[in-house]
Amino acid sequence: MDIGDTVAPRSDQMNAEDMLTGERTFTVTEVRVTDSPEQPVSVYLAEFPDNRPWKPSKTDRRVLIMAWGNESKKYAGHRLTLYRNPDVKWAGEKVGGIRIRAMSHLPGGKRMAVALTETRGKRTPYVVEPLPDDAPTSPAVSIDLLADLVDTFKRKGIPEDAWRSGANQVTGGSATDLETITEAEALQVLDALKGRADVEEPS
């Protein structure tokens, strides 16, 4: 039995623990700005539950501005790869945090290297690799894989209306059944359904 889901953090935002299995690439759907002094920016990602936005640190907000500009409304459709950096500190202690590995729509489409101030008097090099501006396409899901995927949904106690809803969330409302989504999107559906109240974990 896969116990990976049992350690998923319960929170109102993406956490560094979400990247423990490795870096992941996401597509920005929306950016919201609030009056929160600590975390004023919430970035919503197509491949992640929409009730858990990524709230970038000040360092990462500087990177976003340098790469994509000040106007956050233009970020929708842009892509970025996030990873867990274990060296990120909080209150002087290494606690780990989310950092940007790569981004689409970089100036000139080239690698970006900057020195940013992370602590008083200390500047740290920050390198961002280029991502293609358009997401790579993947082949349609095979019939055998569809059967395996449905079995996975059933084994995890995910009702049909829930995975259909998840499929529509991932594909922007265009998926009415599994035959309309790609293999990569199908796997994203599983991620999108994690933590939903109507999804029961198997006993």
Image: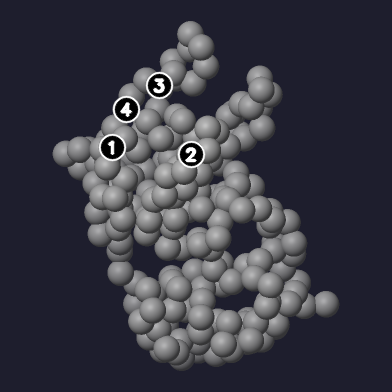
**Nearer mark to the viewer, of 3 and 4:** 3
- Examine the rendered structure and indicate whether residue 68 appears above or below residue 5: above
Q: Toward the viewer: 25 or 52?
A: 52
Most distant residue in the right direction:
203
Rate crowding at label 4 as few (under 14), some (14 to 19) or many (20 or more) other CA atoms within 10 Å.
few
Q: Position of residue 136 (x, y in %)?
A: 30, 64
Q: Residue at (69%, 72%) from the top-left corner?
A: 197
Quadrant of the frame with the N terminus:
bottom right
Which of marks 2 and 3 precedes in the sequence?
A: 2
Which of marks 1 and 2 precedes in the sequence?
A: 2
Residue assigned mark 1? 70
* Residue 4 makes an appearance in the image: yes
Residue assigned mark 4? 113
Residue assigned mark 3? 116
Mark 3 vs mark 4, CA separation in Å: 10 Å
Question: Residue 52 lies in what quarter of the image?
Answer: bottom right
Decide if residue 4 is on the left or right side of residue 179.
Answer: right
* Residue 23 makes an appearance in the image: no
Residue assigned mark 2? 35
Q: Amino acid at mark 2?
A: Asp
Q: Amino acid at mark 3?
A: Leu
Q: Position of residue 79 (x, y in %)?
A: 34, 53
Are discs 4 and 2 less than 8 Å apart at CB?
no
Give SS at disc 1.
loop
Which of marks 2 and 4 precedes in the sequence?
A: 2
Q: Toward the viewer: 189 or 187?
A: 189
Q: Residue at (42%, 49%) from the top-left corner?
A: 32
Q: Toward the viewer: 90 or 203?
A: 90
Quadrant of the frame with the C terminus:
bottom right
**Nearer mark to the viewer, of 2 and 1:** 2
